[in-house]
Image (cartoon, rainbow, N blue to C red):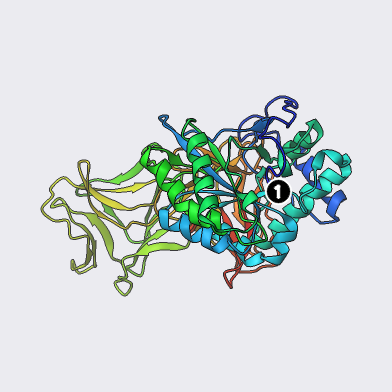
Amino acid sequence: MGAMNRPLIGAAVILVVGAALAAVSIAPAAARQVVATSVSTATKLQVPLGSSTCPAPRPGAQFYAPGVPGGGKTVALTFDDGPGPSTPKILAILRSFGVRASFFNVGVSETRWPYEVREEADDGFLVGNHSWDHPVMTRLSPAAQAAELDKVSSEQRFLVGSWPCTFRPPYGDYDARLLALAQTRRMAVWMWSVDTEDWKAEGSGSSYWVRRIISLAESEGGALNHPVVLMHNQSIPMPATVAALPTIIEYFKERGYTFVDLLGRTGPPGSCGTTRGRFPPPLSTALRPGASLASGASLASPGGQYRLLMQRDGDLSLLTSGGRALWTSRTSGSPGATLRMRTDGNLAVISTSGTQVWVSGTAGHAGARMLLPSNGDLAVTGGPKVLWSTKTTQTSLTPGERLQPGWYLESPDLACRLVMQRDGNLVLYSASRQPLWSSGTAGSVGASAVLGRSGDFELRSKTWQPVFSSGTQGHTGAVLTLARLSQVIVLSRSGRTLWSSG
C-alpha cells in the first residue's frame, strides 16, 4: 500500500542526490555499465546492452503531475500494489473514458496475475516498479534495496518486454541510497500529492467508503494544478475504488484537467497523445509539370530514406531503405513504361505505346506537381492542397532495414515519431515533442539503427561497433514496429513481444 499507516509524504526524507542527468542524452556507456552490473549482481540475469533506457529521470522524488505544452492543469491517476482482482475493472473504466493512468506493481502480485500486467502494458498504460514484496525500503541494506528493485524490474521485462521507467517506494518511505539506486537504473521516483486512502476500505464496497474516496480525491486534488492521485488495486478486491473511479474522472474532466501518465503522455491510452503539428514539415523531392522518370530510373526523398523507382517491368514502386515496397502502381507487364507528371495535373505511368496504364486521377489541376517527402508519403499537390497521396507511413522495420541519421518512423496516426538523431541517440517523441524513450547513445555521432536478420535490434557506430542492443537475437523474422501504443516494440513472427521501450 502506498501510504498505509503513515502520514502523507511528510515522513519521507527529501534529498537530492547528485546533479540532474541531461535530458534524453545521458552519457550512455557509464549509465549502461551501472545498470548491467547492478541487475546482474542482484538477479544473476544477463542484461542486454542498453536494456534499461528510459528518459533521464530528474533527481529526487517527484510529487506533481507532468505539465503539457501550452500550460493548463494536469492530473495523474496512479494505482499501487497491483495487479489484483479489481485490475481488469479499473482498466475497463480508464479505457471507456480514454484517460491515462500509471500502475505501480508489486513483483509477487505480478507472478499471480501476469495477464493483468500484460493487459496494462498492451493498453498503453505506464507500468512502474513498486518493489518485489512491499517492504519498508529504508530498513534494508543497499544490496537488499537493489534486489527489491531489480527482481520486479526483471519480472516486468519478462512479462512485457520492457524495464520500468518509474519507481514508487512502498509506504512512501525512501532515503538517499534508494534515490541513488533508482537514478542509476533510470527510474524516476514518484510520490503523490493526493491520498484517497482507499486501502482503508479493506475490501468493503459500502457507500461510505465510495463517498470518502471521492471526497478526498476532489477536495485535495481540486485545490492543485497538477495533482498526482494515489489509489490502489491490491491483491484483494477493491469495489469502493472501482465504484469511485468514474466520478473522480468526471470531476477532473469537468474542471479542464488533462489526464497524463508519469511520463507526460496525454490522450487515449495506446496513443502518443493528442497535440498535433509539433514536428516540422518534411522536405520534399519534386517532379514538376512535364517532367518524366524513365524506365529503370529513380528519385530519392531528401535524406535518402525512401526511393521512388520506375521499374523496368513497368511497375512504379515506393521503396524503403531495405528495398521493401510501401506502395506500387501494380502495372508490371508494361516493360519500358515511364512515369510522367502531366501538365493537366495527372501523374501517370505510360507504356511504350503511349497508353496510360496507371493515373492518379488528378486531372484538371494544371500546374500540380508530384512530391516525395522525407516521410515517404508520395503525393500530388496543387499549391498547398493534397490532391492524391499514397498515405504510406512507415511504422516498422523488417529484417535488414535501418534508420540512418536523420531518418525516422512514425505511428499510423502520425502522432509518435522514432528519430535516429545525428548525435547518435535514438529517441521516441510524443505528439507534443516530448521524449518518451531514448537509447542513451548520444555521443556516437553518425550511428545507425538496424534490425538484424536474426531479430536483434541494434544501434551501430560509424565503424559498425554495437552501442545498443535489444537482446532479441535468435528470432529470425522479427519486426520492429510503432504500430501500437506509444512504444517501440520488437515482435516475433507469432506476434509475441520480445522487447519494448516501455
Q: Is residue 255 visible?
A: yes
Corner quadrant of residue 454 = bottom right
Along the viewing direction, whichever of 7 and 423 lies nearer the viewer: 7
From the viewer's perspective, is residue 304 above or below residue 346?
Answer: above
Q: Is residue 406 visible?
A: no
| Residue occupying the point 87% across, 49% down | 41
Along the viewing direction, whichever of 276 and 166 lies nearer the viewer: 166
From the viewer's perspective, is residue 324 above or below residue 386?
Answer: below
Along the viewing direction, whichever of 3 and 206 lies nearer the viewer: 206
The amino acid type of the residue labelled 1 equals His
| Residue occupying the point 66% across, 65% down | 114
Left or right side of 419 for 283: left
In the rendered image, residue 48, in percent from the top left (x then y), is placed at 75, 53
In the rendered image, residue 375, in percent from the top left (x then y), is placed at 40, 48
Corner quadrant of residue 17 = top right
Along the viewing direction, whichever of 358 and 394 lies nearer the viewer: 394
Helix, strand, or loop for circle 1?
A: loop
Corner quadrant of residue 456 = bottom right
Q: Residues within 10 Å of mark 1 (few under 14, many from 20)?
A: many
From the viewer's perspective, is residue 158 above or below residue 284?
Answer: below
In the rendered image, residue 133, in percent from the top left (x then y), is placed at 78, 53
In the rendered image, residue 35, in percent from the top left (x then y), is placed at 77, 44
Instruction: Provide the residue designation for mark 1.
Output: 130
